[in-house]
Image (spheres, grey):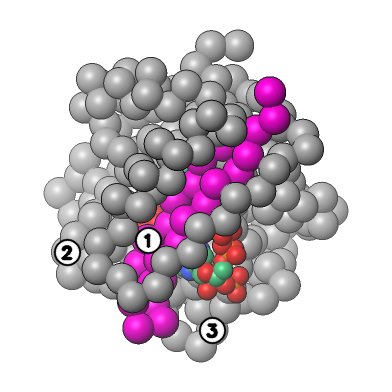
Amino acid sequence: MPLLSVRMRASLKGKHVSGAERIVSEEDIPSTLCELLKRPGEHDFLKLTLERLEEVEEIAFDLSISSHKFKSVEEGREFALKELVRSGVPEWVAKKGIELLSKGANPKGGNMRGAVLLDVETGDRLEPDPGRGIRTVRVDWKDRSAVREVLLRRGFTDRTLDALAIALKNIHCGVLAELCWSDDPDYLTGYVSSRELGYVRITPLKEEGDHLGGRVYFIRRERVGELIRCLERRAVLISLSP
Ligand code: COA
Ligand code: AMP
């Protein structure tokens, strides 16, 4: 049965406020649209995109999840640094990634609209537009409600469900390690993820009220073109069991 990518984005006064996506069959389009339309809070613009997918790859949910709590942001970031190093990122490159997110990775100030691509060997930024960055798109869970139930039962949130999908696709495309914390000033949990360590949730990675956040993908320069195409274009469905 043909599958479609359904994407929603909403903004308020030109500022992005909400985004979500699904990969579903034609018969699930009406319920998916209803669900996505309920998601954004206050907005004055909303765009829906429906696109038939030629090819959809299926991958397994094969990452462990762990959670770590600390007394301060300094301790949380120190732990994130160690986890990045354990994933094979040189310490100075990992430090650069943390510094970029803490100061706002957009060279024009503030947040980016996607992720930084950081060369693990040279520490160079490789995203073609450093204000925009690269977004991981066209990814969803094969059986979203079953995975959601499992994660919520284990005390995780809808946010974890969506961030985990991005992290899984990233590793599948060849990202060596990822660092993320949200730009939401009330959400202080971030994560480091890699094939070696799994999905490592860390609280807090930022101070309450801080509007800065983002993602850094630590990558190898030789694969950058192929990697960007995979992150942006390849459709990936994640299944609970292989
Ligand atoms: N942050 C900030 N701005 C964003 C944005 C984001 N996440 N996504 C879209 N925009 C804005 C940008 O201005 C963008 O222009 P740009 O390409 O110059 O940056 C513009 O909207 C058009 O974006 P486009 O790439 O055409 O959007 P899209 O229709 O492909 O949708 C989303 C992308 C919204 C689905 C994606 O960004 C997103 O938020 N995904 C949800 C993440 C998620 O939870 N995935 C897991 C599902 S299991
Ligand atoms: P969020 O987890 O939604 O709070 O997003 C945190 C940051 O990650 C944003 O400020 C963007 O820089 C970046 N980002 C958001 N969506 C994506 C995506 N789909 N792929 C890569 N980076 C993203």
Residue 184 left/right relative to 98: left
Q: Quadrant of residue 10?
A: bottom left
What amino acid does circle 2 point to?
Glu
**What's the distance in space between the residues labelled 3 and 1, CA to CA?**
23 Å
Residue 149 in the image: x percent, y percent?
30, 21
Residue 60 left/right relative to 185: right
Residue beneath label 2, please? 208
Tell me which residue sits at (77%, 34%) in the image.
Answer: 55
Residue beneath label 1, please? 18
Tell me which residue sits at (44%, 50%) in the image.
Answer: 20
Residue at the farthest top position: 242
Mark 1 C-beta closer than 8 Å to ligand 1 = yes
Label 3 or label 1, whichever comes before in sequence order: 1
- Discs 1/2, front: 1
Q: Quadrant of residue 65?
A: top left
User: What's the magenta region?
Assistant: 1-23
Label 1 or label 2, whichever comes before in sequence order: 1
